Image (tube, helix red, strand yellow):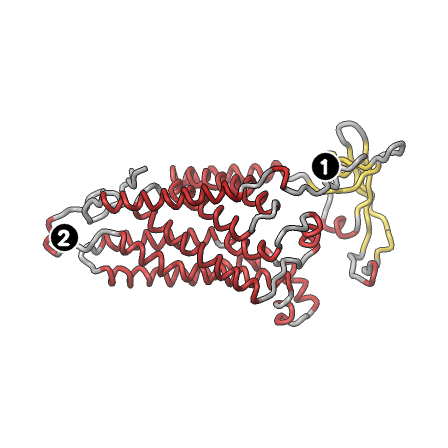
Amino acid sequence: MGLTHTSTEVDYGRPRPVLAFVLVLVVLGIAAGAILGMVALWPDSDKVPRGQNPYAAEGVSTVDGKVTGVEGFDCDSGGEGPDQQPSVPGQCARVSASTADEKASFTLDPGRYRAGIEVGDDIRMTRIQPAGETASFEFLDFKRGLPLIALAIVFAVLVALVAGMRGLFSLVGIGVTLLALTKFMLPAMLAGESPLAVAVVGSTAIMIVVLYLAHGVSIRTTSALFGTFAGIGLTALIGLWSTGWTNLSGVGTEDDQALMATVPALDLSGVVAATMVIAGLGVLNDVTVTQASAVWELRALRPAAGRGAVFASAMRIGRDHIASSVYTLVFAYAGSAMTVLLLITAYQRDLAEIATTEDIGQEIARTLVGAIGLVLAVPVTTALAVLMASKPLDEDEVDERAPVAEPA
């Protein structure tokens, strides 16, 4: 593997084969360490707990159907459920549907009925038929496969058209990420391995593949990669410390409790720390690549500038990027938790009180730790990029030498 690049990136410096060779050795060493870590943490298939699939019990299955009729009726839903819990008031609905083999019918609660269901909708139903009894059906969900596939195709086409080969390679990187998550990281955590160790090793391996795929093999990309490694390490350490300091147990929702019941040996507190590393990878990657690119462009524009001047200029760019990236993290959480935030507002509960609960506190800590790791990664990446970029040229060299398309 050589640190060369086939793009038209311009660098005013001289070729640096020694630096390129040293970086190759360092990257290969880190990659080897990540591979060894994955081998050590790789779970045996028989050690991965498997809970009972509620739709695979005897007499229970899922079937596809199409809605053929919807009829509302009064089901005495007055807005209060068991234990005086609020429920959606209004009518229920009798829904009929057709499957490949039979006719089906089920009752829909007021909440789902008000959300919307119409004749012609494609749905999935739970079919329940105990031995010797007639089959009954329950609504499971709408079928969304085709729309989601269409959106994915549109996304992939646009990325390929706008970003070209780099866009295509980034799509391959998404596939690599999903593969690492589903085949290594999630099973390893379920098998009882340290969630944080799995997250760090898996994230390191993912970033090595993704960055070089999307941005090419070059010294510039390597500087961004080293900055990303620093961000991963800092986020992991801060996440581990903050999880213990804030007493985040990882048990905040019914899903968390169901997971704990299914996998009793799983360290949910460790999972919280692991998610702090994984959740911030995308923004961290964005920031480190941008900072490395900024340093290289500044060096090309100001070949005689000292390293301190280039660092200061790149950090001005980095400060703007930090501000926008922090907003990105906050808005991403606000958008994903909008239902919870609306419910809090409707209940008129004090925000300071809600913020300290387990489920909301997890998200706040995850956002803050990710932001801290991101902020610290900016000066680290910038400094590494400045050191690895070309040395400043003398004024007479700048006049004599034209830009050369050499390895970045």
User: What is the crowding at mark 1: few (fewer than 14 residues within 10 Å), some, or many (at least 20)?
Assistant: few
Dot 2 amino acid type: Val
Q: Between marks 1 and 2, how big is the CA–CA gap?
A: 71 Å
Secondary element type, mark 2: helix
**Looking at the picture, how far across and down is residue 203, in whole percent?**
47, 48
> How far across and down, in percent of the image, does residue 277 sit?
50, 54
**Front residue of this view, candidates 120 and 213:** 213
The extreme front residue here reads 40
Residue 224 marker: none
Rendered location of residue 27, percent (x, y): 35, 45
Q: Quadrant of the N terminus?
A: top left
Q: Amino acid at mark 1?
A: Gly
Q: Residue at x 48, y 39 (%)?
A: 176
Residue at (38% x, 42% y) in the render: 212
Q: Nearer the viewer, residue 231 or 296?
A: 231
User: Dividing the picture into quarters, in which one does residue 291 lie?
Assistant: bottom left
What SS does tag 1 mark? loop
Residue that appears at 58% across and 55% down: 270
Above or below residue 281? Residue 308 is: below
Residue 146 appears in the rendering: yes
**Which residue in the protein does label 1 denote?**
120
Mark closer to the chain start, 1 or 2: 1
Q: Which residue is mark 2?
A: 398
Q: Residues within 10 Å of mark 2 (few under 14, many from 20)?
A: some
Can residue 328 be seen here? The reply is no
